[in-house]
Amino acid sequence: MTAAPRIDVITLFPEFIESSLEVGVVGRAVKRGLLSVQSWQLRDFAHDNYKTIDHRPYGGGPGMVMLIDPLRECLQMVRQADPRPAHVVYLSPQGQPLTQAKVRELAHRPRLVLLCGRYEGIDERLLQAEVDEEVSIGDYVLSGGELAAAVLVDAVGRLQDGALNDPQSAVQDSFENGVLDCPHYTRPERHELGDVPALLASGDHRKIARWRRQQSLGRTWLRRPDVLARCDLSADDRQLLAEFIAEWRAQDGGPGAVR
Ligand code: 4GX
């Protein structure tokens, strides 16, 4: 038996990471031992009685910068806690965007270490010496890296073997196919707010699969043209999408339609 993948999180708010693991699919994966998550209080590695972990930036300006040495000593302890080589990730808006492809790549790593910055960030020299990759969860600014780390732990954690009740659900997710997910319906079939598309209740699984694929392609075309542009569509897919677009133009998108 090989050891479960391990994620260490270095943070000023370990409770934040721990509380996010008390619930849901990933919390259950941790409880089942499919994944191990350990958080570390950076302040425990401060050198003075005031527990200082930051200081004013050289060159002046607002805010504080996190010191090299507490982080470095913490990382040394973290590395020593497990013999497997660690892939160190710093969460920041300057990083490469976190996509499902990146999540899959990180999910294969036996050991991840996540650095959570507060204030204006971390001394660049520590980043250059110790960080393997900088990752951003999106083009907006958080007050610290903890929420971004929790996002990464969640996205990576749910992909671990046995984390999802039905492994098929990971395959059907948005982005796993390179396109957005299709709409979903459940009981009742008829409702004041509308009826379930008849085809879905027909039992014709080939037709249902084609309809879902068409909806996925159509929604990606409508909502995320940037995602669609990066898709390598089969001839079949292009046919389904052309049909969707023709129907959409006929129904909602007539010339001068206001939406
Ligand atoms: N995706 N933040 C990092 C500290 C910081 C400040 C300045 C570098 C420079 C974020 C994101 C994010 C807020 C985490 C600022 N680091 N992290 N923190 N977006 O906004 O990952």
Image (cartoon, rainbow, N blue to C red):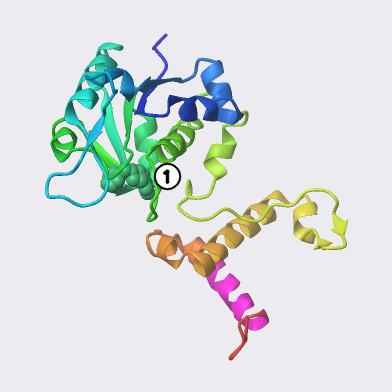
Residue 43: image location, x then y, percent: 32, 23
Q: Quadrant of residue 126?
A: top left
Residue at position x 48%, y 25% from top? 15
Q: Nearer the viewer, residue 237 or 172?
A: 172
Is 158 positioned to the left or the right of 112 in the image? right
Residue extending furthest front? 50
Residue 76: image location, x then y, percent: 22, 17
* Amino acid type, mark 1: Gln
Q: Which residue is mark 1?
A: 100
Q: Secondary structure at mark 1?
A: helix
Residue at position x 58%, y 29% from top? 25
Can residue 164 be seen from the camera position used here? no
Residue at position x 31%, y 37% from top? 117
Q: Residues within 10 Å of mark 1 (few under 14, many from 20)?
A: some
Q: Quadrant of residue 14?
A: top left
Instruction: Tell me if residue 30 comes above or below residue 203 in the rendering.
Output: above
Q: Which segment did they paint magenta?
A: 240-251
